[in-house]
Amino acid sequence: MRVNSGFSLIEVLVSMFIASIALIGLGVTQLKSLQFANNSFDYTVSLVQAQNAIERMWPELCEIQHKSPSKFEDQAFRQALQPPQSLSFRYTLQLPEQYRNDTHEMPITVTWKDLRVADDAQKQLLNQITLNASFVEVPDVCNP
């Protein structure tokens, strides 16, 4: 009587095929996870940059609202609100053309470049955030 012990060649090949499909699926899942982590990072950095621009406007708010509204349109002032040089190659801050004294609100948009996405305008809309900044009416007692 013949006794076989162990696995047949077919059983080994089927189990290797199933294991390889599982490993490929695991790799694809890991790549998607990294992609979403990168998108979350860009989103977070953009939020921080928009919030930084809002915070940089507060010290100049009295002057912009009362003494010199054109300061908001000044190129040097607008450049000071932009992200630092180390981030400006990837993140772009967009401000309205002028400060609106009637509503004291403005949209601040930060866009970023994702080289994995084609330059299609519709797809690039996903790579931006917009904060609606609201400022209070400050008293007209600006420091000299």
Image (spheres, rainbow, N blue to C red):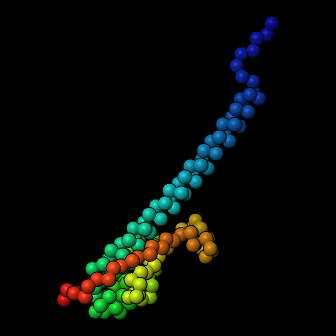
What is the count of numbered marks?
A: 0
State whether residue 4 is above or below residue 48: above
For residue 91, side relative to residue 16 (left or right): left
**Residue found farthest to the right:** 1
Q: Nearer the viewer, residue 134 or 4?
A: 134
Q: Is residue 116 visible?
A: yes
* Outermost left residue: 144
- Based on the displayed image, in which of its 4 quarters is residue 132 positioned? bottom left
Q: Is residue 17 left or right of residue 98?
A: right
**Residue 78: image location, x then y, percent:** 37, 84
Looking at the rendered image, the quarter that the C terminus falls into is: bottom left
Q: Position of residue 8 (x, y in %)?
A: 75, 24
Q: Nearer the viewer, residue 25 or 60?
A: 60
In the depicted structure, whether residue 123 falls above or below residue 73: above
Residue shown at the point (80%, 6%) measured from the top left: 1
Please name the residue shown 71% across and 29% down the image.
12
Q: Position of residue 35 (x, y in %)?
A: 55, 57
Is residue 38 or residue 142 the one in the foreground?
Answer: 142
Q: Position of residue 142 (x, y in %)?
A: 22, 87
Name the side, left or right, on which 78 lies relative to 113: left
Of 76 and 103, the residue lying toward us: 103
Q: Is residue 89 visible?
A: no
Query: What residue is shown at x 39% (from left), y 67% (from top)?
Result: 48
Residue appearing at x 70%, y 19% in the figure: 6
